[in-house]
Structure formats: C-alpha cells, structure tokens
Amino acid sequence: MTLTDKRPAHGAAQRVEPLVEQFLGGRLPVRVRMWDGSETGAADGPLIHVRTRRALRRLLWEPGELGLAEAYITGDIDIEGDLADGLRAVHRAVRERGLAAPRPRLADRLRAAGTA
C-alpha cells in the first residue's frame, strides 16, 4: 500500500487489515477506505468507502450480503467504481481460495472492536 497526502499510515484500515486477510485467506481484491482516510487492499480495485464505525460493526456482526446491504442502504458505506466488478472480484477470490463463508470468531470480532 502506498500512502500519499494526509492519509494516516496506521489508521483503522491497517488495524482491520490482518483480520480481513485472515478471513479471506489473502489480500483484499477491492480497495477499502475507512472513515479516517486510511486505505488498504487492491490499488486498482473498486473502492468501498466505510464512512462510519457503525458500518464496520455492522459488517463484523453480520458479515456477508446482509451486513453489506444494510450498511449500503443506510449510507454507512459507499462504493465507487463498478459495483459488479467489485462483487465479481470478491467472488473470484473466494472461489480461487476455496473459502466458505465462516463467521469471524468472537476473538477476531473483539480484536477488531477496538477499531470500530
């Protein structure tokens, strides 16, 4: 990840990144920008802007389509770029890595709760 301008080097994205990589079994196929301006993930991927801590909590407690849909509908996250491309990238990464859709363990949620 290359940081420029005023983006924090050790922000919310960097604190959540290890949990997401563990969950996905590798790097994010999309780019994520957190409420504090920190970013992680694929530099050339569609951007998911997590606008609030509430959005992160929602995604942690309801991972998958339901949490994402609720966060999007309430305006807690925005998606820049082609949404379909982003969803395809995530689906492809899940399929290639042979991932099921496990829920994050309680310990992982608690570790991320300090960020949310």
Image (cartoon, rainbow, N blue to C red):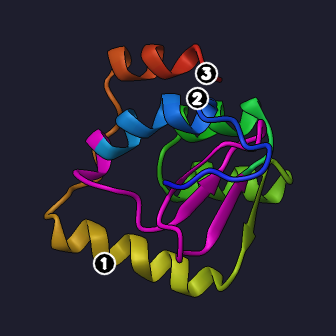
Pointer 3 or 2: first along the chain: 2
- Residue 116 belongs to magenta span: no
Q: Which residue is at 33% across, 56% downward?
A: 27
Residue 29, x across and y down, in percent: 41, 67
Q: Real-space Cα distance between discs 3 and 1?
A: 28 Å
Going by the image, does 51 lie left or right of 114?
A: right
SS state under label 2: loop
Q: Real-space Cα distance between discs 2 and 1?
A: 29 Å
Q: Is residue 37 above or below residue 105?
A: below
- Disc 2 crowd rating (10 Å Cα; few below 14, some 14-19, many 20+) is few
For the residue pair 22 and 58, the one nearer the viewer reads as: 22
For the residue pair 20 and 43, the one nearer the viewer reads as: 43
Going by the image, does 58 lie left or right of 76?
A: left
Q: Is residue 16 above or below residue 98?
A: above
Q: Label 1 belongs to which residue?
A: 92
Contact check, label 3 and label 2, Cβ < 8 Å: no
Q: Which residues are magenta?
A: 22-49
Which amino acid is tagged 3?
Thr
Pointer 3 or 1: first along the chain: 1
| Residue projecting furthest to the left | 98
Residue 41, x across and y down, in percent: 48, 57
Q: Label 3 belongs to which residue?
A: 115
Residue 67, x across and y down, in percent: 60, 48
